[in-house]
């Protein structure tokens, strides 16, 4: 008997991706932002007037990451530095590494290295973390510490040049330059390196600073999500594409979610 199967989504056509042209509403809002003297506060206010930027299905991380409520970690030093990933996002990323049992982890854009350090501190001795950043001094947070031996620190702009042809990763965290063209480039590199059962996580999907033009993550993910399932994790700035057996994003992206309870005491959403 022939079984009906869902048509496979076309692979992402990275070469054909262009930044979408802003519509009339967006251009008018940008004018208002420019008139404000490029105020970050006005940017945040006006970005909220573009609901199309938050297009991914938002899901509770506890529903999409294995053993979410059971995995344990130790946080000794908190991330510092203006570009470091906020602690709530690091905690959820660590829960991805533990829940998906990722042994080969790649961080694209590593900065001071607090996230890499906490990944190294909270995973077993066999786990290896590779970090790539164009800033030669990146990784100060773990360099000279015992966990540095678990971390392979690479320097350079994001490209496949820094990797062997057969190199694969179970968990990849994309967090380098957030401009649209860079997100496209970095995701192309990440997709080439993602293991068959791997999980890809992007940072800064939920930023509220659209008009300064440096964050093209939401627009880029909107285009990728036509080819691969991607969800945003509630309470965080993270977006995820998982191929992990039993925890594939497609299962969660399509599911009808119950309405949030009206009673705030009963709301179980993660507080970012
Ligand atoms: C937001 S920070 C990364 C924060 C880090 N993931 C963490 O969790 O703390 C962005 C980093 O990306 C690096 N970066 C920006 N553009 C890059 C590029 N084209 N290639 C490599 N690294 C880049 C910057 O040097 C910076 O350290």
Image: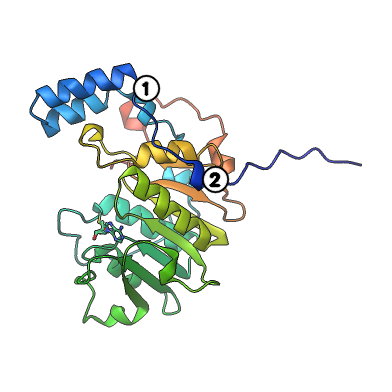
* Image side of residue 124 versus residue 32, left or right: right
Ligand 1 neighbours mark 1 (CB distance < 8 Å): no
Q: Nearer the viewer, residue 15 or 9?
A: 15
- Secondary structure beneath dot 1 equals loop
Q: How much space separates mark 2 and mark 1, taking CA atoms? A: 39 Å
* Image side of residue 179 versus residue 79, left or right: right
Q: Are marks 2 and 1 in contact (CB under 8 Å)?
A: no
* Image side of residue 166 versus residue 54, left or right: right
Q: Earlier in the sequence, mark 2 or mark 1?
A: 2
Residue 80 visible in the current orientation = yes
> Badge 1: few (under 14), some or many (20 or more) residues near its Cα, within 10 Å?
few
Placement of the N terminus among the 4 image quadrants: top right
- Residue 28 sits in quarter: top left
Q: Residue at x 43, y 60 (%)?
A: 172
Q: Is residue 52 above or below residue 272?
A: above
What percent of the width, then of the height, locates residue 58? 43, 35
Q: Residue at x 36, y 78 (%)?
A: 150
What percent of the width, then of the height, locates residue 143? 22, 77
> Badge 2: few (under 14), some or many (20 or more) residues near its Cα, within 10 Å?
some
Q: Which residue is mark 1?
A: 262
Q: Nearer the viewer, residue 248 or 190?
A: 190
Residue 59 visible in the current orientation = no
Q: Which residue is mark 2?
A: 12
């Amino acid at each position: 008997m022939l079984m009906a199967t869902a048509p496979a989504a076309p692979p992402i056509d990275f070469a054909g991706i262009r930044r979408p042209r802003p519509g009339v509403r967006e251009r008018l809002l940008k004018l208002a932002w420019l008139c404000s003297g490029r105020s970050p506060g006005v940017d945040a206010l006006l970005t909220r007037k573009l609901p199309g930027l938050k297009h991914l299905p938002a899901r509770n991380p506890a529903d999409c990451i294995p053993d979410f409520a059971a995995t344990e970690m130790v946080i000794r030093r908190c991330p510092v530095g203006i570009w470091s990933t906020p602690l709530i996002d690091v905690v959820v990323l660590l829960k991805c590494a533990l829940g998906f049992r990722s042994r080969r982890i790649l961080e694209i854009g590593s900065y001071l290295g607090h996230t890499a350090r906490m990944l190294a501190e909270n995973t077993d001795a066999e786990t290896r973390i590779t970090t790539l950043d164009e800033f030669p001094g990146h990784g100060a947070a773990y360099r000279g510490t015992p966990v540095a031996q678990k971390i392979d620190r690479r320097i350079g702009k994001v490209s496949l040049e820094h990797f062997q042809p057969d190199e694969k990763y179970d968990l990849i965290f994309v967090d380098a330059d957030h401009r649209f063209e860079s997100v496209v480039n970095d995701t192309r590199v990440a997709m080439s390196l993602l293991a068959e059962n791997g999980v890809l996580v992007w940072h800064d999907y939920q930023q509220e600073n659209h008009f300064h033009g440096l964050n093209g993550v939401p627009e880029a993910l909107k285009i990728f999500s036509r080819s691969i399932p991607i969800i945003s994790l509630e309470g965080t700035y993270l977006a995820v594409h998982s191929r992990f057996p039993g925890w594939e994003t497609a299962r969660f992206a399509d599911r009808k979610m119950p309405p949030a309870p009206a009673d705030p005491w009963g709301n179980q959403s993660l507080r970012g």
